[in-house]
């Protein structure tokens, strides 16, 4: 007999699946998440009693809690993430693939009895506003209160979701167990043909908040391919001019490469006089659809932020600091014994008496046995905060159709080679620019830090199907969207020979956005180069920002010899993606090599 407590009004389809998963995982009890504040308070208190979460100083951080993940479980695990579809060709060359039957069987062994002595929470959630025809419903079963509380911030959860679902079978079946947290037995499995996600042996971030990368990118990408829309790793930002007209851009940068910061941008001093108002529509995921006006419209399916903490401070990201003042979960940052939190390049001095992200006594300036600085906060430490707390969040966030996009921007972290900004010269060229994004690896994923890897559309870890088919889908969207946005590429991270950033970044990036929007309207000064159009050195409004002589030229430089090598590398990469590669992109790489004189 299922020992279910407080079952919500769920359809037989839902309850029979929950019963089946209960029989596999054998929890002590099952609790349905109704979405009420009262239930959330009870669960939070329970997590604090067991030590899973720690209550922060409620005067300084009202409604805020702290969590430490297992030291071996601090980022997404791309090598343990799989697309499990019947035909391996549909997963493509960039995804790990498992045959669905084998994947289920192996993971079932890890799930079997994994919740003994624990509670299984049933979390009905909606990506996108509850009840919108564009939204997608999922139900996550999890044995982690931390996951429940995070999900309740990141998306709409509770009874209202089940009401909307009714008797429909159109929901993603998400099963999560932290099990024993064994990294060897960690699996993040996507079964797009069954609308199912299984995640086991992790309890952190994108591995376990299954509405985010698993549903809203990998599964939604698969759905979008079949239904004619796009699920993208993109921020969405609005720039309102004093005359009240607002233009929106969507931008894809790889993990930890500045999406949140750009989405929350504050105009720099020198441009304040222009009276812009910035609107943060989304900071990580965009669902993009062609509409009847021939344009692309983007919506943010999330209801919260899961932001990188280190580097966030009142100078770099004041909106981010404001957003996490209350009702926020902090994970893997420094914890003061006074119940405050701190991280590297945050605000103010660290707490005098502090514990690091692993719970060890920590002081600023501490070094290890090799003399290397010991950081207090893990570089991928994050905070989870409600979207509505962002001062620049628009009031219309729950309008399901989203906003019309004037420009699409790609970017990465490139010390060398890539200019501050350039413009593609056609839709297909823009798709090629997206396909050739590369970036230095960050701590948002396991692997060698700093190494440049190709990360097409910033989607390498998130594309739920064959990457070459995904490129073709993008090419096709351009064919059926007469007023498609122009496509650009930016790089905030170019460095001088001393390893210093050439561009100040953050709020100053608005100067580049201004030029992008001008070009989208066919205005603005530019010069043609083999890779696309870059601004003339005097094209950006630099009021209030003095760069040393020659720096702008250095930022905008396109070095032919270096780009020949890059074009070769792009060609090798595209060739590695298999026979589905659209001929349009092969033509683009050929044309680029020709323009470079290769
Ligand atoms: P995910 O949440 O992992 O997808 O990351 P994200 O793309 O939202 O990155 P985020 O905005 O959190 O920035 C990651 C890191 O890049 C932080 O340490 C920032 O301080 C830094 N960063 C962001 N924007 C800029 C910029 O314009 N210039 C420089 N130099 N650093 C930046
Ligand atoms: C990313 O890595 O791109 C993130 C964080 O946004 S996670 O949710 O862990 O994927
Ligand atoms: Mn992300």
Image (cartoon, rainbow, N blue to C red):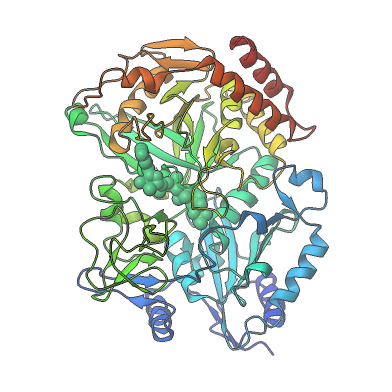
Rendered location of residue 452, percent (x, y) = 55, 38
Instruction: Count how many numbered circles sit on residues in the image.
Output: 0
Quadrant position of residue 242: top left
In this picture, residue 592 sits left or right of residue 403:
right
Quadrant where the image shows the C terminus: top right
| Residue 16 visible here | no
The residue closer to the viewer here, 587 or 132, is: 587
Name above or below for residue 204 compared with residue 233: below
From the top left corner, tell me how far across and down residue 434 is, in percent: 57, 30
Task: Name the residue rendered at 42%, 43% in the picture.
Answer: 259
Q: Residue at x 70, y 42 (%)?
A: 226
- In the picture shown, does residue 581 fall above or below 24? above
The x and y percentages for residue 101 are: 82, 63
Let me know if residue 118 appears in the view. Answer: yes
Corner quadrant of residue 358: bottom left
Q: Which of 469 and 394 lies nearest the eye of the viewer?
A: 469
Q: Nearer the viewer, residue 559 or 127?
A: 559
Task: Decide if residue 389 is on the left or right side of residue 149.
Answer: left
Q: Is residue 212 above or below residue 440?
A: below
Please report the residue visible at 59 percent of the width from the left and 12 percent of the height from the top. Answer: 596
Vertical placement of 242 versus 403: above or below? above
Q: Quadrant of ligand 1?
A: top left
Check the picture and name the quadrant holding the N terminus. bottom right
Instruction: Using the image as rendered, state which of residue 374 and residue 171 is in the foreground.
Output: 374
Q: Residue furthest front?
A: 370
């Amino acid at each position: 007999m299922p020992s279910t407590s407080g079952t919500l009004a769920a359809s037989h389809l839902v309850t029979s699946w929950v019963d089946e998963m209960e029989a596999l995982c054998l929890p002590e009890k099952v609790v349905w998440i109704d979405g009420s504040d009262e239930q959330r308070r009870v669960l939070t208190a329970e997590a604090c009693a067991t030590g899973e979460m720690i209550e922060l100083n409620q005067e300084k951080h009202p409604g805020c809690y702290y969590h430490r993940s297992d030291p071996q479980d601090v980022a997404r695990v791309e090598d343990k993430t799989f697309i499990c579809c019947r035909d391996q060709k549909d997963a493509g060359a960039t995804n790990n693939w498992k045959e669905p039957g084998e994947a289920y069987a192996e993971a079932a062994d890890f799930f079997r009895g994994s919740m003994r002595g624990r509670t299984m929470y049933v979390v009905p959630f909606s990506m996108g506003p509850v009840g919108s025809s564009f939204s997608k419903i999922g139900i996550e079963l999890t044995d982690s209160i931390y996951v429940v509380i995070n999900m309740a911030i990141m998306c709409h959860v509770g009874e209202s979701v089940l009401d909307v679902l009714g008797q429909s079978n159109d929901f993603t079946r998400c099963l999560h167990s932290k099990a024993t947290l064994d990294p060897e037995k960690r699996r993040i499995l996507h079964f797009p043909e069954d609308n199912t996600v299984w995640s086991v042996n992790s309890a952190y971030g994108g591995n376990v908040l299954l509405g985010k990368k698993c549903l809203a990118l990998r599964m939604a990408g698969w759905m979008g391919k079949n239904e004619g829309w796009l699920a993208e790793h993109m921020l969405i930002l609005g720039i309102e001019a004093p005359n009240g007209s607002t233009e929106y851009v969507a931008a894809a940068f790889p993990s930890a490469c500045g999406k949140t910061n750009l989405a929350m941008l504050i105009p720099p001093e020198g441009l304040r006089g222009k009276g812009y108002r910035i609107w943060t529509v989304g900071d990580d995921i965009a669902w993009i659809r062609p509409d009847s006006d021939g344009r692309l419209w983007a919506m943010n399916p999330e209801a919260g932020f899961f932001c990188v903490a280190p580097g966030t401070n009142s100078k770099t990201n004041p909106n981010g600091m404001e957003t996490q003042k209350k009702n926020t979960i902090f994970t893997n940052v420094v914890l003061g014994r006074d119940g405050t939190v701190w991280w590297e390049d945050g605000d103010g001095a660290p707490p005098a008496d502090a514990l690091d992200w692993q719970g060890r006594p920590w002081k600023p300036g501490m070094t290890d046995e090799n003399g290397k600085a010991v950081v207090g906060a893990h570089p991928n430490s994050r905070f989870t905060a409600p979207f509505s707390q962002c001062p620049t969040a628009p009031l219309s966030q729950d309008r399901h159709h989203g906003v019309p996009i004037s420009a699409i921007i790609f970017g990465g972290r490139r010390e060398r080679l890539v200019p501050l900004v350039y413009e593609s010269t056609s839709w297909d060229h823009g798709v090629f620019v997206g396909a050739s994004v590369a970036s230095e690896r960050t701590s948002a994923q396991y692997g060698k830090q700093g190494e440049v890897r190709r990360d097409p559309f910033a989607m390498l870890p998130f594309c739920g199907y064959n990457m070459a088919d995904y490129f073709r889908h993008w090419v096709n969207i351009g064919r059926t969207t007469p007023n498609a946005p122009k496509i650009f590429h930016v790089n905030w991270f170019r460095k001088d020979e001393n390893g210093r950033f050439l561009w100040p970044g953050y709020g100053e990036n608005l100067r580049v956005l201004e030029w992008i929007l001008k070009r989208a309207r066919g205005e603005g000064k530019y010069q043609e180069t083999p890779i696309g159009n870059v601004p003339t050195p005097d094209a950006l409004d630099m009021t209030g920002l003095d760069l040393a002589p020659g720096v702008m030229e250095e930022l905008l430089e396109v070095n032919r010899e270096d780009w020949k090598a890059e074009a070769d590398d792009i060609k090798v990469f595209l060739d590695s993606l298999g026979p589905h590669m659209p001929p349009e992109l092969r033509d683009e790489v050929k044309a680029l090599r020709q323009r470079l004189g290769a």
